Image (spheres, grey):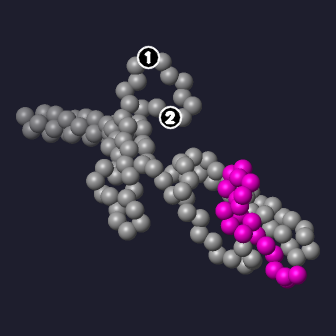
Amino acid sequence: MSDKSTIFIFIDDETKPIAEVQSPVSFELDTRKLTDGNHVLKIVSKDPTGKEGIRKIPFEVRNGPAIAIEGMKEHAVVDGVLPLMINAYGKGDQKSFLIEGSETPQSIPWWVWTLIIGFAGWALYYLFTYFSMGQ
C-alpha cells in the first residue's frame, strides 16, 4: 500500500475524472476545452487508509470574446426604446495581444459635462465682469 494520497480531479458532474494523480502534484487545467460559463472543479482525495476528502471550487470560464455593453445593467427594470452600445473583442492568445478593438468606447460621463458647463459659466462671468469694469 502506498503512503501517498490519490487525487481524482473532476469537472462539473462528470463521473470520469480528468486526472488521477498521487499527491503532491502540480496540475494545469486547460480551460480552452471547456465551454464559457459556470463550472465546478471537484477534487476528491483518498488517503492510504481509504478515507476520502472532497473539495468543490466553483469558477467561471470566459475564453470567448469579451462582451461589453453600455445602456443597460444586469437586473435592470426597463421600458421603451433603449439605446445600447455593444462591443465584443477577443483577447488573442498567450503570445500576442490584439490591441485593435480591445477598448470599449463609452459615452462621456455626466460629471465631465458638469465640469465643462461650470468652467464655461465661470469663464463667461469672468469675461463679463472684466469688460464691464474696463468701461
Work out whether 11 lies above or below 45. above
- The first of marks 2 and 1 along the sequence is 2
Locate residue 60 relative to residue 85 in the image: left or right. Answer: right
Which residue is most to the top?
A: 80
For this rendering, which residue is in front, 25 or 113?
A: 25
Q: Residue 109's x, y, as percent? A: 37, 39
Q: Does residue 133 appear in the picture of this structure?
A: no
Label 2 sits on what residue type?
Answer: Lys
Q: Quadrant of the C terminus?
A: top left
Q: Residue at x 46, y 32 (%)?
A: 72
Q: Secondary structure at mark 1?
A: loop
Figure check: 110 above or below 90: above
The residue sitting at the left extreme is 135
Residue 23: image location, x then y, percent = 75, 77
Q: Residue at x 68, y 67 (%)?
A: 19
The residues colored magenta run: 1-20
Q: State whether residue 49 appears in this view.
A: yes
Residue 42's quadrant in the figure?
bottom right
Q: Which residue is mark 1?
A: 80
Label 2 crowd (10 A; few <14 / some 14-19 / many >=20): few
Query: In the image shown, does 93 or 82 lie closer to the viewer?
Result: 93
Q: Is residue 61 left or right of residue 129?
A: right
Q: Which mark is residue 73?
A: 2
The number of numbered badges drawn on the structure is 2
The secondary structure that dominates the magenta segment is loop
